[in-house]
């Protein structure tokens, strides 16, 4: 089994590393580190010069931009290699020694989707290098990966904390059932107090879904509750009440119970909750 840990130069790199270590040890998995160097802004500027300047000025400026581009490329590669070395060492310190690394140029989302084909799970930070200080902001690339990925995605919070209590947000839909089945069977959740919340009115179909979740989780389930009210507010309140270290939920799915997890709810939970979120598709 392999995990794909997506790294960048943001403040989330350490947290992604620590969450990957927790997953790797819990699942007995190896870790593939992925860092994608994106197309430089200088390259875009170079392309914009065509027709904007006279031939002489354009030629001179192009030479300068090419030199800058080459210098930026060298720096980006050196930074990436240093990051990978640091992360590898941190993983080894935590007992994870089956680590491979891949450095790519290109589109982050496309590369992650390509590489996840060989992975059981993807780990990435909530925000990228250009969004560190945007409070409540969810990185656009993170959202695109979550929407397109066929694998469970763990979206790491800014800092890792030991996972002792987890909350499963359940709506009875297919993706939420995948989350329940994973929590019920995975060694990752041995010793973790599992709580489940369903925001619903409690009709017969919803009660049947809740009974299925209770039965599936069995002895691992600490407590399951069906509550009313606003979906996002109810989940957040429950997570805070039990001191959840992790939220587990289906993502962007379509539930037969008129899913409480439409896309906007998934995105809102990722933005609002300052805890890691494990998402299933």
Image: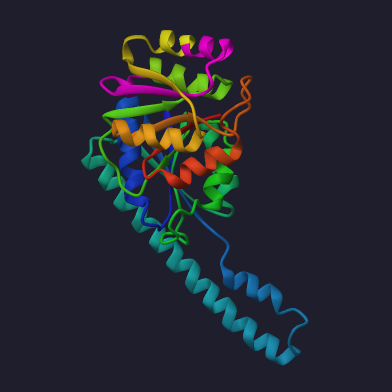
Left/right placement of residue 165 relative to residue 279 reads left
In this rendering, the count of numbered labels is 0
- Residue at left 33%, top 46%? 15
Is residue 192 depicted above or below 230 in this figure? above
Q: Which quarter of the picture shows residue 175?
A: top right
Is residue 186 depicted above or below 106 in this figure? above
- Residue 206 is a magenta residue: yes
Tell me, yes or no, if residue 220 can be seen here.
yes
- Coordinates of residue 161 in the picture (x, y in percent): 27, 40
Is residue 136 depicted above or below 244 in this figure? below
Question: Along the line of sight, which residue is nearer the eye, 94 or 203?
Answer: 203
Q: What's the magenta region?
A: 186-210
Question: Along the line of sight, which residue is nearer the eye, 52 or 12?
Answer: 12
Left/right placement of residue 169 relative to residue 88 reads right
- Coordinates of residue 202 in the picture (x, y in percent): 52, 16
Question: Along the line of sight, which residue is nearer the eye, 124 or 225?
Answer: 225
- Residue at left 47%, top 9%? 211
- Residue 227 is a magenta residue: no
Tell me, yes or no, if residue 113 can be seen here.
no
Left/right placement of residue 88 relative to residue 129 reads left
């Amino acid at each position: 089994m392999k995990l794909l840990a997506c790294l960048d130069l943001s403040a989330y790199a350490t947290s992604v590393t620590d969450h990957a270590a927790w997953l790797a040890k819990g699942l007995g998995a190896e870790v593939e580190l992925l860092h994608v160097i994106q197309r430089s802004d200088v390259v875009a500027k170079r392309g914009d010069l065509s027709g904007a300047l006279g031939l002489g000025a354009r030629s001179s400026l192009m030479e300068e931009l090419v030199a800058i581009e080459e210098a930026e490329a060298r720096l980006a590669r050196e930074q990436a290699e240093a990051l990978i070395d640091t992360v590898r060492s941190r993983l080894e310190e935590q007992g994870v020694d089956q680590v491979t690394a891949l450095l790519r140029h290109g589109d982050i989302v496309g590369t992650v989707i390509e590489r996840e084909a060989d992975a059981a799970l993807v780990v990435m930070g909530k925000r990228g290098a250009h969004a560190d200080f945007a409070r409540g902001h969810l990185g656009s690339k993170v959202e695109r990966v979550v929407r397109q990925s066929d694998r469970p995605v763990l979206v790491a919070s800014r800092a890792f904390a030991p996972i002792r209590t987890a909350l499963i947000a359940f709506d009875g839909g297919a993706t939420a059932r995948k989350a329940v089945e994973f929590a019920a069977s995975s060694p990752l959740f041995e010793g973790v107090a599992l709580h489940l919340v369903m925001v619903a009115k409690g009709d017969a179909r919803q009660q049947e879904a809740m009974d299925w979740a209770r039965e599936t989780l069995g002895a691992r389930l600490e407590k399951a509750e069906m509550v009313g009210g606003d979906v996002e507010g109810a989940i957040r309140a429950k997570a805070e009440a039990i001191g959840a270290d992790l939220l587990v939920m289906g993502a962007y799915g379509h539930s037969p119970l008129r899913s409480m997890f439409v896309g906007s709810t998934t995105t809102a939970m990722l933005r609002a909750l300052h805890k890691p979120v494990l998402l299933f598709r």
